[in-house]
Amino acid sequence: MRVLVISHGHPAFSIGGAEVASHALFRGLGALPGTEAFYLARAATPLRRHADTPMGSFRQGAHETFLHADDYDHWWLSNRALDELNGELADYLRTVRPDVVHFHHVIGLGVEAIAVARRVLPDAAIVLTFHEYLSICAHHGQMVKTQANRLCRRASPAECASCFPDHTPADFFRREQFLKHHFTLVDGFVSPSRFLLDRYVAWGLAAEKFSVIENGLDTSAQVQPRALPKGARRARFGFFGQVTRFKGVHVLLDAVTRIPDADWGEDAQLDIFGGNLESQPPAFQAELGALLEKAGRRARMHGAYGSDELARLMARIDWVVMPSVWWENAPVVIQEAFHHRRPLIASDIGGMAEKVRDGIDGLHFRAGSAQDLADTMVRAMREHGLWQKLAKAAPRPLDIAGAAEAHRALYRQLLASRRASGKRAPARRRALASAA
């Protein structure tokens, strides 16, 4: 079986959960006997493209190729450079001849890439993994209202237009139909969480096309619990991820400032590991700066980190805090925390509430509530035996090999279904044009 994994970025140049997950799947598939894996990643500015072609290698692996795509419409999730999709991308697909094309995102590439794959490879199975709600929600795929960042529980053209007054309900209806039209070309959808699956089914995609498969985690290294002096407590908290408003870092810092001195003591500490603050809106940067100043010695901001550093950083903390104010899906930090036996304190919504079991392997708090988070952190520090109980119950995350096996089983099922039903796309189907 030949499998092509397509991602909106390569983890060597763009560190994000979807990039890491797609590349891990590519490596896992390549290690399976009887499977040949290929990886196509989108490249964009500041990476420079070749003068005569959007294709390139950037000196990654022998089966790793890049498609430079800069002409992208975020509203439609559409690639305006249709000539290059129908030209160079189509030629690449003919050369590789995969049995399966697995998209891990269409950002930058455009949904038209799905149509090109179907036209060029009429017998191949096409798979798409959703990592957030971008197709449903034009607000960065977060399903959070633009007014006061309130959680959004359902999407409709009228409700979406209330978030974006510059667009009419008809605009949103056309966007939805455009995306769903391309998704009819997909044989199977993968969701790492049941919560995200339910959102897409409620939006109108067929439930029978979905499979829940978690992203595979590199489980080669595991750090032991932090050594404690006699009589000491588990009072070191850590945040891992992008420093954005949606990730709730401001809620966490606010919570830290609310904990009484008697409960915080001299041994408690919050370490924030994450980058991207410099690219956030100035108002958010100022807000976070003020909160850091107020927190004083209680909190330390360490900046971005690489995946190879995670185990060393995890060794310094006892609790992983996930204060996101959006639904999330299946954040890799949850798997990483479980792998290293670090209990989580997580918002009680979305994929976080699904993956972290309150009182079993972690603790929930009311999403967006700094006071409830503060109370939960106090409980974590004060309740005798709680850390040990939660750490012991942490589930073993799916490793890269297990994820590859699960995906290959799905690919075989989809290919068999296509053969049995005689499905074959029209030989000369054109790539669908953007409605922008």
Image (cartoon, grey):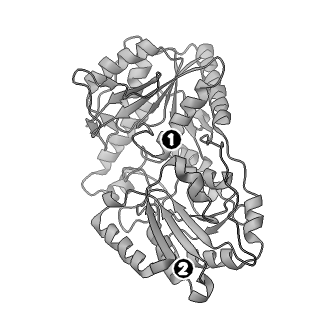
Q: Is residue 6 visible?
A: yes
The quadrant of the rendering that contains the C terminus is: top left
Quarter where residue 8 is shown = top left
Q: Nearer the viewer, residue 250 or 78?
A: 250
Taking the spot 54% from the left edge, 17% from the top edge, the residue there is: 99
Number of numbered callouts drawn: 2
- Residue extending furthest toward the left: 51
Horizontal and vertical percent position of residue 435: 28, 34
Q: Amino acid at mark 2?
A: Gln
Crowd band around label 1 with a 10 angstrom C-alpha radius: few (<14), some (14–19), many (20+): many
Residue type pointed to by label 1: Val
Residue at (59, 38) in percent of width and height: 207
Q: CA distance from mark 1 to mark 2?
A: 34 Å
Q: Position of residue 87 (x, y in %)?
A: 30, 17
- Percent across and percent down for residue 252 are 50, 71
The reply to whether the C-beta atoms of the residues labelled 1 and 2 are less than 8 Å apart is no
Horizontal side of residue 47 vs 241, given as left or right: left
Residue 240 in the image: above or below residue 169: below
The quarter of the picture where the N terminus appears is top right
In the picture, residue 208 is in which quadrant? top right
Mark 1: secondary structure: helix
Q: Residue at x 57, y 61 (%)?
A: 349
The answer to whether residue 199 is seen in the rendering is no
Mark 1 lies on residue: 20
Task: Pick whichever, 58 or 424, lies toward us.
Answer: 58
Q: Is residue 197 left or right of residue 429?
A: right
Residue identified by numbered label 2: 371
Whichever of labels 1 and 2 marks the residue nearer the N terminus, that label is 1
